[in-house]
Amino acid sequence: MVKGALRKQIWHGLTTLCCCLLIISLGITSTAVSLEDFFNQFFGTSSVKVVNTSDSYEDTTYFKSEYTSAQELVDAREDLNREVVAEGVVLLKNENSTLPLGKNSKVTAFGLGSVSPVYGGSAGGGIVLNSNQIRSLYQCFTDEGILLNETVRSWYKTTGIPKVATDIQVGGRGVQAAEGTPWLNEPNELSKRRSGVTEVDITEAVAQLRGSYSDYKDAAIVVLSRLEGEGSDMAPGSLTLTAEERAIISEAKDNFGKVIALINTPTPLEIQELKDDPKVGAILWIGYPGTNGLVGVAQVLTGTANPSGHLFDIFAADSTSSPAYQNFGEFAYSNAESAGLPVEGSYYVVNAEGIYVGYKYYETRYEDCILGAGNADSKVGVYASKDNWDYTKEVTYGFGYGLSYTDFNQTLDRIVVDEDQKTVTATVTVTNIGNAAGKNAVEIFVQSPYTDYDKQNKVEKAAVSLLGFGKTKLLNPGEKETVTISMKMKYMASYDYLKAKTYILDSGDYYFAIGNGAHDALNNILSAKGKTIADGMDYDGNASQAYKWTKSQIDTESFSESYANATLEVTNRFDDADYNYFNPNSVQYLSRSDWSGTFPKSYTDLLATEEMIPLLSTEQYVSNASNLSGVSFGSTETDYSIVMMRGLDYDDPLWESLLNQISLEELTNFITQCAEHTPAIQSINYQGSLDGDGPIGFAYARFSTDASAAYHLDNSASDYLKNYSFATNCIEPVLASTFNPQLAERRGDMYGEDSLWTGYITTWSPGVDIHRTPYSGRNFEYFSEDAMLSNIMSANICYNMQKKGGIAGPKHVVLNDQETHRHGLSTFFNEQSVREIQLRAFEGSFVPDEGGSMNAMSSFNRLGIVVACYSKELQEEVMRGEWGFQGYIITDFGQPGYMWAKASLVAGTDAFLAFGSSQPAFSAFGNAYTEALTPQVLLSDSYLLVNARRAAHRILYAYANSNLMNGLSSNSKIVNVTPSWLVALYAINSILAAGALASLILYVLLFLKKPEKQTIL
Amino acid sequence: MTKINIKDFKPGLYLSLASVLFAIAAMIAYLVLSSDGENTPGAVYSVTLLAIAIQLVILVFNHGEVGKNKYNTGSFLAPVLFTASLILFILGRLDWIIQVQAHNANYAPMHASFYVAIVVYALTIAISIAASFMSQIKQQEI
């Protein structure tokens, strides 16, 4: 080897190495700069700093926490979750005093879920597991005095779970794992993950396990679980008990006197066979309890807590029997390919069930069977009935149904209908007539008359609809409480989309009723109408628990005006969301006037018409010259800060001056880069915000470690607190099942506290879409199939979160009721159904004197063929115009292929949930919104410019009145700082560049050097 | 061109050849990945092919008298271009990665070809960097 040649090779290699590393480093730097906020979150740094230019003291903690330490907050929020779970689990069956078990019971638990239950849903708004925070079923049960069979438990851990488990992130955004053991099936195919193949075959192992039963004989607990998550719907058939599950139930029945089934699902499971089986003594629905909620379950099992939950959805005997299910899943336009439709414009679904979603279908059809109306008892739509349609066969457990360890007597004292105030007030006295202390839910249902007017004008009426609810305190045996529930009449109005084209209250007899769920209330109404078992009722109701109110004349005026803007008519806005608009007489909606004739067929072959094709394929943006007087950018005439806008009206003239200070580049960046944050705007001393999912708490948040923040962890905090995850609560169906509005208030309050202590401001929560069928993959993120249960729970969360300065962002507005082809799914409906079901669920969240939420997230799907984010009818006319929504609207995760930026901006979208940087110098990539809405494009189009400015105004208005302003005064300035990780990256780049240059120089020098006498090595 | 005996081949030459083979394998893995319909920039192929071409040209060049005496290592440009390919690949997929992370419980949808392509590209880069350190043809001793 020649020495000089060796040296040359080394420098050559080093030059190559340094250059390659430099390219990698530059790539990382570029990406990091584009995702600066994410890296800041990860490292706990910031790119801006607030400096106070004055020494004078001001109390700038505008929103204050009730807690003096992080640990106090953690204790409170975990106590709350346990309480919610204890109140939200639903006792469906309890025979032969199976429950409660009592303390020190020795039980044998079967099922994968007995060792590794599902704590929360996956993805998006799913649970963020921190293994330190998980309280396993074993731990929770043991602490509450339920001793578990170790032999069976050990078998599941060492043999059962490994048979079916495959690897999944533990500690990441997943749904397991008791004792660190994950379980999931076929993770490489999302749909199969939801397939319900969830149980291991125990038959081969029972011989070895049976020897252990005698020591743990008090009861057998069988845990039946289903995993649900964003991105895919539950697979067909996955809500039926599997052979493996039946095997463990059999094993339990054969060997134990008491068998208890725990339903660990976010959605109804087909459990008629458990209900009918006399050897299954108790059934308890537990939902997804969150990381520590199983304590609440254990408390219910032992009797420490008395179950008081009521079902959030109806449990049908056959989960595919609903009319909605007939049009759920994948339906492609028959000419999608030939018409060249993009994939986000090729699929549709028809909500042919109309208003008959969930229990409204089953209960209304039941009433019509009793009344002998509408061919209700025909064979059409029969799934579980033997012959003709039979409610008692089709339904296992009704909406709002739930049992207790004690008995309660409810007396409907009074219903006051105030037509001037447009309110209904119910007074109900609840007496505990049993032997155990407990809480009792009071559910108020309403029936509107189904009149000739309705039949002629196709206004459908559900036989019974939840209008309001409340809950008693803990009542001791013999104790009573009078519960008063105020409700708004607007929520009992029907929507007449054909004749009056607004909300109406028919003339005729209305019934208000109480009961243990919708079916019980309906039976009370039927009894009040004089009906009995002889007429086909499954049991006689109690007429005294129903109240009749008669309205003499139809009212088409009272709810025909917006309460936010009296000059704005409330009228049809979604005529073109009905497929019949494009292709008349193609779709028939379900009507109680003829159940058999109108029971939905599956619309599998709809055509995208000539009129529809361009609307599905290309952006329909039309500019409109706008007045720019008084508008400027980068103005230095004023030097206002965002904190000065706190408390000012939206229309205060100071806002215009503030907005004029913002440069065009800042404005563009601000509205197009809103993924998980809002960007800083230095010209107005706006430091930017951190935002995030989701319905069970802030997904990525950790306690703030910023010493300048009013609430933060100090350096001596434990690792547990430093790593504490906030997205750990039980799912919304569990909260809904409490039927306790105060618990929703407290959860909202807790989200507000979370906001104060983490520095995260907006959470896209609550999830308020409707459980249209049990199969939607995101049912775990939404409350219920019922609009008012969702409405009231959500409104309470929003209102209370925002009292602490957080911003609630209910999602997804609207109709995100399935995951299959959710991107751009054409969702066809009639206006009555969307008004009374899906929109009604959201309404309370946004009306200023109800929930008053300051943010909303729009949905991926279309209303008809108009994507939610560019539906002016939805965003501007309904949400802002009719409801008075005052916040800002953000898209769901940027899908610029069809969520067109310009059309969205002018239709009321204010922020685009997208990543990327518009800074040209280091931008590795922008995003399509940034490219569509560049400063140059905005400048060239006054319509876009005006709307972009309006969008920024709305966003800033929301944040100016949030706890983001904590710590800011009029003397505060925002200065840029280079975060430490970026400094490190720049340093690395410099070193590598220097290394590459030095190596190259040395190599070239050697290369050019004349060969000399070489030394042989 | 000087007549070269195969006995004159040094490990650096084999490494250069290996980098070419791995680069081809990386492109195949990338092609398989692209079947998922997500963003897979075509520039990755172009840059990789360019790198392969340069590596082979240098390999042939090193067989000549000038190359053998003056250069005689793997290409400098080839690993740089392989690295650029990998960066382009990942940047092109960054949106997808972020969406998967934001919306899914785990990285299960990121099917094996994604990981394989990255690993093979990384190996290609490492091998070609190693080749740039090492001589390819045994030089005459003076």
Image (spheres, rainbow, N blue to C red):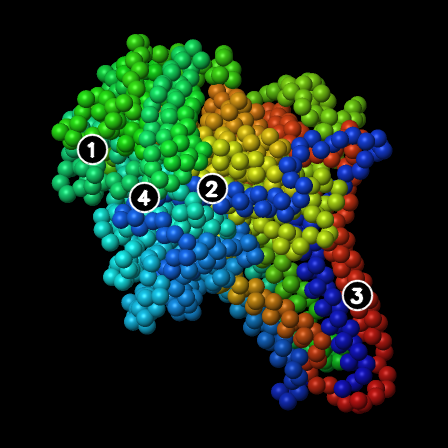
For the residue carrying disc 1, how many other residues have a C-alpha within 10 Å: few (<14), some (14-19), or many (20+)? Answer: few
| Amino acid beneath label 3 | Gly
| Amino acid beneath label 2 | Val
Marks 1 and 2, Cα distance to the nearest angstrom? Answer: 32 Å
Say yes or no: labels 1 and 4 on the same chain.
yes
The residue that label 4 is drawn on is A92
Whether pointer 1 and pointer 2 mark residues with C-beta atoms closer than 8 Å, the reply is no
Which circle's residue, 3 or 2, is located before the other in the chain? 2
Which circle's residue, 1 or 4, is located before the other in the chain? 4
Residue A925 is situated, as x and y percent measured from the top left of the image, at: 63, 47
Q: Residue A110 is drawn in which quadrant?
A: bottom left
Which circle's residue, 1 or 2, is located before the other in the chain? 2
What subunit carries mark 2? A
Whether pointer 3 and pointer 1 mark residues with C-beta atoms closer than 8 Å, the reply is no
Residue A666 is situated, as x and y percent measured from the top left of the image, at: 70, 35
The residue that label 2 is drawn on is A84
The residue that label 1 is drawn on is A539
Instruction: Give the foreground label among 3 and 1.
Output: 1
Observer able to see residue A453: yes
Q: In the rendered image of this protein, does residue A929 appear above or below residue B132?
A: above
